[in-house]
Amino acid sequence: MTYRAGRPLSLVSFVAAVLLIASCGGSASTTTIAEQPAASSTTAQQAARPTTTAQTQQPTEASEDTPQDIPECEGPIDEIALGATVSSEVVEGDPLYFCVDIPTGVDSFTVSLTGLTASLALYVGYPDLETVQQGGVGLKSSTAPDTEDKEVTVEIDPDLIWSPGSYYIEVSASAFASSTFSLTVSTP
């Protein structure tokens, strides 16, 4: 478990406000995550969506019978299916957020970040987006340096904090950096 101290709250608040305005159909004088003008909320959201490049695993039986009481992903973020890979690009100051719903019956899952051309950070948080943005007990991060592939594995253990539900993922770039990447969420 890692707490990310030292991160200016004002930057997080600014990014959250811009994303909230864009997702609600409002306009802002800044650009969206994809660095394209916010012509309309639908156009901006479609332009900012990462591209799904491969389906690496079939969903488990548990995901087909997911109970209704497991919360779904919320917020101005992109969902990634368990077993899928997305490819995108991130620039410093504009972190990208993803969410994956982990159904009952999954014992663990791994989030992998590959194909980096600059130093990126990978964070996985539970139970909400705020945990990823501001730190907290339910936050895990990769310790791999620079452009090395990053990986975070979460063992589901309801006796601790790690339960089935929505897990949030942040991919962010180091100062003055931008990089393409592939993000995969897999089960053993």
Image (cartoon, helix red, strand yellow):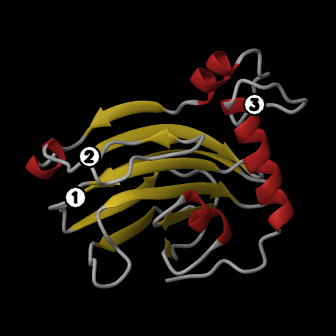
**Residue 68 drawn at (x, y percent):** 25, 47
- Looking at the image, is 41 positioned above or below residue 113? above
**Residue 105 drawn at (x, y percent):** 14, 61
User: What's under tag 2, amino acid-wise?
Assistant: Gly
**Residue 106 drawn at (x, y percent):** 19, 62
Q: Which mark is residue 167?
A: none
C-alpha distance separating marks 1 and 2: 7 Å
Which residue is under mark 3? Answer: 35
Q: Which mark is residue 83?
A: 2
Identity of the residue drawn at 65% across and 16% down: 43
Q: Classify mark 2: residues with Cα within 10 Å, few (<14), some (14-19) or many (20+).
A: many
Q: Secondary structure at mark 2?
A: loop
Q: Of label 3 and label 1, which has the lower sequence position?
A: 3
Whether pointer 1 and pointer 2 mark residues with C-beta atoms closer than 8 Å, the reply is: yes
Q: Of label 1 and label 2, which has the lower sequence position?
A: 2
Q: Secondary structure at mark 1?
A: loop
Which residue is under mark 1? Answer: 187
Identity of the residue drawn at 37% across and 32% down: 53
Q: In the visual, does 115 lie left or right of 163?
A: right
User: What's under tag 3, amino acid-wise?
Assistant: Glu
User: What's under tag 1, amino acid-wise?
Assistant: Thr
Q: Classify mark 3: residues with Cα within 10 Å, few (<14), some (14-19) or many (20+).
A: few
Identity of the residue drawn at 83% across and 51% down: 14
**Residue 140 drawn at (x, y percent):** 48, 74
Image quadrant occupied by the C terminus: bottom left
Identity of the residue drawn at 57% across and 44% down: 75
C-alpha distance separating marks 3 and 2: 28 Å
